[in-house]
Structures are given as C-alpha cells and as structure tokens.
Image: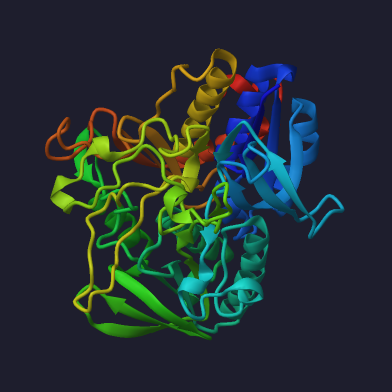
Amino acid sequence: MARLVVLGGGVAGHTTATFAAKWLGKEHEVVVVTPNAKWNWIPSNIWVGVGEMSKEEVTFDLAPVYEKAGITFKQAKAVSINPEGKEGADKPFVTIEYTGQGKAGESEEVTYDYIVNATGPKLNFGATPGLGEGSQIGENTVSVCTADHAVHANQELRKIFEKAAKGEKQKILVGTGHGMCTCQGAAFEYIFNIEHEARKAGVRDNLEIKWISNESFLGDFGMGGLHMKVGGYVVSSRIFTESLFAERGVEYITGAHVSKVEKGKVDYELLDGSTGEEPFDFAMLIPPFAGVGLKAYNKAGEDITDTVFAPNGFMKVDADYTPKPYEEWKASDWPRKYQNPTYSNMFAAGIAFAPPHIISKPMKSANGTPINPTPPRTGMPSGIIGKAVAHSVCDLIQNGANAHLHEASMAEMGAACVASAGKGWMDGQAAAMTVYPVVPDYEKYPGTGRDTDYTFGEIGLAGHWIKHILHYLFIYKAKLKPGWTLIPE
C-alpha cells in the first residue's frame, strides 16, 4: 500500500486529494493535512463581507466529506519535510502539529510515499507595518481573505453605512496593502460590491470610495493586462476597467506601495518616487502572499530549505528559475508537471508552487522599491493543476516510476473569471472574462501574447447569475455529491 500525503485542503489540495482517492481506491491511502476544520469557497467571501451571504453559506465541515471519500483527515499544520527520512529510518516524512481533533499542540511524523504541497499562501499581513499581524488583524483595516475575516469586515462596514445614513461623510479605501501583492481581483470585487450595496442602502452620496493598487494601470490584475473581445471589438482590459470605475464614480491610485498603515490613514509610495497619505474611515487592503514557512531537512538533519523552496517560501518545481531580463522571459519558463527537481516524489499545486517570474512587467519606484503585482495562481488554475498532479501521482503509484506525468502549463491553460460588481437577482452585475492562455505567449501570439478569439469579456446581469450558480455548483462538487467529477475545474 502506498501513501499519498496532501498538505492543504483548499481548492488545489482538496481537488488533488479527492480525485486521487477516487482513482486509487482502497488499495492505497490518501492523507490530507490541513489546519482548518472547514472548507471555504473563497470567491464568495466578498459577499459575506457585504452581508449578502453568511459564513455558513460559504463553508462546510471537511471531516464527514473525507470520511465518505475514504481519506484520512488530520487537522494540523505541516511544519517541516524530511524527504530523505532520518538516520535509522529511510522513509520520508512530514512533521505536523495538530490544531484540532482534540490533539491541539501535539506533533506527529507522518511518513509518505508521495507528497503534494498545496498549502496555499501565508497571508503576510506583517509585511506592511500596521496592516495587521496575528490578533491585530482588523485593528486598522479589515480583510475578506477568510470567512471569519469577511464576517468582521461586514460588521465594520455596517457601522460606516449607519454613519452615512445619518448624514456623516465617510471615506472607504479598498485595494492592495503592499507593493508586491497579488489577488487584485478579490479587492476589485469587494470595492464594487460595497458601491452597489451603498446605492441599495441609499447612502452612496455620503461615501467617497477609493481604490489603491500596486498595478501600474487599472486592469493589470497581475497578468500584465490583456486584450479581449467585447461586443465584437478587441479592447484592452485597461479601457474595460477604467470605464467601470468612471461609471461607478470610484477614484483610484495605481502604482502604489502601501508602506505603513495607521488608524485612519495609509502612507504610500508611487512609482515616480513621490509619497503621500490617504485618509480613510474604513479600509480593506489585501496582504501580500508568502509561503507558509515549511522547513526541509536531509537525512543528517541539515537544513535544506533553500534546496526545496524558493526564497519566498514557495516550493520549487520544474520551472526555469534562471534569472534573466524581462525581455527574455518565455512561456516555456513555466512549470508543466509541478514536480520538485530534487525529490521526484514531491509535487506542488496551486499557490504553493514557486513561479519562475512575475507576469506583469517588473517595476521599481524611483527609490528602488519594487511595485508590481505577483502572479495569480488561484481559482481555476489551482483546480486544473491539482487534478493534473493527482493524475501523475496515481499513475506513478499504479504503474511505477516510469509512468507518464500529466502536464498543465499555465502558458497553455485558459481560465474563466467571473468578477462580481454587485449582488442581486435583478440588479446584480458581474464581469465575465475568459483568458487564453493565462501566462502570455508572445512567440505564439505576437503583440497581445494571447488568442483574442478565446479572450473576451462582458459585464452585466447574466454574469452575476453565472457567478451565483457557480457558487452552488462548486460547493456541490467539493462536497463530492453525485456526479461531482463531471463538474469541470
């Protein structure tokens, strides 16, 4: 019997584990290690953050789902990996520390034959002073990164709406909280849902709503922007996005590194080197992401973390990490198999793999401060990668070391995104966009880097209906309900 250990129970980890358990059957063991007792459909947290959904509607208990699937569930966080085992024991293992199941604080060494790192990101609030670290999250700003954060965000937003209803002018600031953030899309959805709810509540006139982002232009989204077909015409995402901001009366600051957050104000630096302050009464700023801090040790107990992980804490895979000028970056630099180059029984999926470079053009301020989005690897790409990795591991277990490894390069992968701009069955809106490929390939598609026949976008009520349906569809899939494998990633 072989044992596959999956670290993380988010989109990538859950996808990997559930498909692997289905394909491997009872002859082999699949173990999931995740510190969370519940699964969270993160894209809907923005609706929790404006009071349009409850925490219970976007989460469910993992234990009964894994029991049904025959998966061993350990509510714990991974601390370190020993891919060579240790003196006196050749079997590789991962050291975990329990966070629940009546074992909180206890440690265990879990051996494995194959391991998939799908730990996702550390929400690195501490990278920006005052943004919030540990128990201080919410002291100066709020977050929608977790369901609990989103519940708190809505509670604070209601206070702002109450003040606005009394005629008090209020200022709302939403965006990114550091010059190296990703996940601009979540902030984009949240700011327009706030604006939509403000109009519904009749308080919009008393709210100044402002966007602040590390993108050099609106519509970059960490993908260097894109050209897409809208109404039969090819337009840039910059025009598409600027139009929405103008239509909703939302002001913006781009190319900004938030350097410090205090009660009621942020300090920021722009690409031109200038600095400024922006006051607020309510702020939701996405933190930068980092690896979760896993360590790695060889058989002698020596630290080999730098061998297994990149400096940002994400796991190295079959990508080209050679430093090179931006002009020399290629689509072929991106990983295809997500296999660690040093230890062939280790894989990474979703946010946990180290990208070879950013997608947007790298930029620094006149003072040398990096201000550019890091690559998005969430949502649809995470699910596709997780399924491909599950295929590879299952084939290795069932067919031996020479088995074919499945490929899922983000430079050959399309993705669909439905970004909410307000919830409501008759007045909701969402921007529905497809992009192909996610990582631009300028050799194959000169000029735009993408196929404009498969890269398009529209905004309207139909997009909202699609996003609402997808919410229930993907929770249905994640609960392994009948026919779940037929629902695409």
Q: Residue furthest front?
A: 88
Q: Is residue 95 above or below residue 132?
A: above
Count of marks overlaid on the render: 0
* Residue appearing at x 29%, y 59% in the figure: 218
Here the colouring is rainbow
Asked if residue 488 can be seen in this view, the reply is: no
Q: Is 264 or 468 nearer to us in this picture? A: 264
Q: Is 333 or 229 nearer to us in this picture? A: 333
Q: Is residue 18 above or below residue 116?
A: above
* Residue appearing at x 75%, y 49% in the figure: 108
* Residue appearing at x 39%, y 79% in the figure: 259
Q: Position of residue 125 (x, y in %)?
A: 52, 69
Q: Position of residue 219 (x, y in %)?
A: 30, 54
Residue 438 appears left or right of 205: left
Q: Position of residue 385 (x, y in %)?
A: 47, 33
Q: Position of residue 310 (x, y in %)?
A: 41, 53
Asked if residue 267 can be seen in this view, the reply is: yes
